Image (spheres, rainbow, N blue to C red):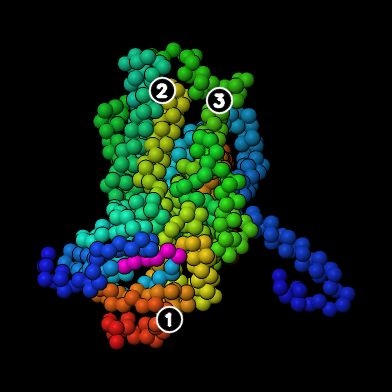
Amino acid sequence: MKPIFLITSGTVRTPLLLIGSVMQLGQKILTRLLSYKVSFTLIAFVVLLLIFGFLTPRHSFIKPNNLTALAKLTPDLGIVAMGVGTLMICGEFDLSVGSIIPMSSYIFVKLLEWGAPLYVIPFLTLLTGALLGFLNGLLVVRGRIPSFIATLGTMMFWRGVLYISSRMMPIGIRAYLESGTWLEKTLISSIAGVFPVQIIWLLFFTFILGLVVHFHKFGNWIFATGDNKTAARAMGINTDMVKTICFVIVGVLCSFMSMIQALRIESFAATQGIGFELKAIASSVVGGTSLMGGIGSILGIFLGTLTIQILENGMILMGAPVFGINVFIGVGIVLFAILNLYVERVALR
Amino acid sequence: MDSSKLEAGRNDTSPGKRDEDYLVEMVDIHKWFGKVYALRGVNFEVREKEIIGLVGDNGAGKSTLIKILSGFHPADRGEIYFTGKKVHIHNPKDAKKLGIETVYQEQALAPHVSISRNIFMGREPTTHLGFLNKKVMDRESLDTLSKIGLVLTNPETPVEALSGGQRQGVAIARVLYFEAKLVILDEPTIALSVKESRQVMEFIKQLRAEGISVVFITHNIYHVYQIAERFVILAHGEKIGDIKKEDTSVDHLSEIITNGRVA
């Protein structure tokens, strides 16, 4: 920038100044853009959309049936990622989501099997998630162990419990729940025959958490706790409570999603939720959430989820082996983690 | 506890008389950490609208004394009076209720959070249902900052983007907004450049202009000498000096600290 202004002699002055101010404006916009990491997620999302739109065989990516499938799958990851991302802003991880999901699903299907009244089942299922989340929170704040370890423990523990109690046998729900009940209509029906209602749920949770995280005082406590716990405590914020509530939010969202999933696949499956912990963290990181806590946005996590989801879907359509998709998700996470750090440094200069 | 030791450590000034002029009076404060006798009967007073330099070498007991006053440690013995009334400070909240605020270097702020969100951290003004009143937060932040002479335009700036001096300003503005009567600054200039340190000392002067007493804890006698009106010197858990500015000099003070006694 500066050298341009050094040449200020005579006639060349005006155009150079013009170029200078245009560049300055460009830099301003760039800095502004950089301070919103979300824009990078948006760019990645759009670029992937274009790539898959053009390059998948017979443009299958943008065919209606694929888009419908995406619209049904994305909320699964999105609802969980909303909770996981919020918890990450708060400075903690939850690796146990992959076990909370099938545990809730198991309880949900078992309640159906036992013939519990339909209107209490969702509440009991959500309560299961809340309790499992609360337990995670308790282990972290009372046991004073890193959440990475605490939730690694609960992940293994609950999956073990689940394998023993279910003997890994799937349980179909059709024997206990006729199709077309209000519960199914609320959670997995389609609007106008094509638009899955799950999308509405994802948008609902995004909106609610967006309000809480960015506009409510509790959100300010989340950021403060994740960014500088000592300061938050010194200012009278009960950081243990904030963290525990965030763990409970994760648990409840996992339970909610587990009901959607169980109803969609019409059964409980012991393999439900496997890999979700990492995909949810990946969505958050791609959405600009810091691994150290204190930085992140709900909009970013939302876009991050979409990006991870279409990355997975698009690669499958392009013929990548299903089990090899992780290669690309892995690269995505690392690239975005590096990008986030870089952006932060540039934006603060 | 060894009582003979205790007597030996006792300060000469006799406790008992409560002077209403004092904002804070700490009387005969003792503190042990296990076998370490950290404070040996220290008396410490702060008057209204007074800037005190609390100085002394590492391990002299400065931080311990201040942590007792701000509620982080209980004293093992001794009494604290606030505006002439006996008070019990069990935790930082008690201290805050009295109007005693402590500003610690690097511990006070969340770096990636905005200026206004930092200033109101934990005490956010809300509209209804607990939603943040951002208008009030932003306006009050800038107003309070300008009161201590720090003019910033964007309350949304993350604190990390500020200079070290400005960051101290944000931490100081926070205690000013919440109507502190006594502000304790623990090494506020330790990591700052010369220019930034000067800025922080301007903030401190503004605090006093707002009617607030200040205790300035530091190793840096040159900094504290410029603004403090009185110096309290600690060494090995005892108060070895309590000198008005007009009765001393930078050289004299550093001599006392190095020798561990009044020459």
- Tell me if I can see residue B133 in this picture: yes
Residue at numbered disc 3: A197
CA gap between label 2 and label 3 equals 17 Å
- At 23% from the left and 69% from the top, the residue drawn is B14
Q: Which mark is residue A122?
A: 2
- At 51% from the left and 21% from the top, the residue drawn is A186
- At 43% from the left and 44% from the top, the residue drawn is A87
- State which mark lies toward you, 2 or 3: 2
Is label 1 in a helix, a strand or a loop? helix
Q: Is residue B188 left or right of residue A345?
A: left
In which quarter of the view is residue A189 placed?
top right
Residues behind callouts 2 and 3 on a single chain: yes
- State which mark lies toward you, 1 or 3: 1
Q: Position of residue A148 (x, y in %)?
A: 35, 48
Q: How many marks?
A: 3
Q: Position of residue A168 (x, y in %)?
A: 31, 29
Question: Looking at the figure, which quarter contains the C terminus of chain B?
Answer: bottom left
In which quarter of the view is residue B23 placed?
bottom left
Query: Is A286 inside the magenta-drawn segment?
Result: no
How crowded pointer 2 is (Cα within 10 Å; few <14, some 14-19, many 20+) is rated as: some
**Residue type of the residue flagged with mark 3:** Val
- Tell me if I can see residue B237 in this picture: no
Q: Earlier in the sequence, mark 2 or mark 3?
A: 2
Q: Position of residue A12 (x, y in %)?
A: 85, 74
Residue at numbered disc 1: B246
Residue at the outermost right position: A11
**Residue type of the residue flagged with mark 2:** Pro
- State which mark lies toward you, 2 or 1: 1
Q: Is residue B55 left or right of residue A71?
A: left
Is label 2 in a helix, a strand or a loop? helix
Chain holding disc 2: A
- Please provide the residue range marked out in magenta: B44-49
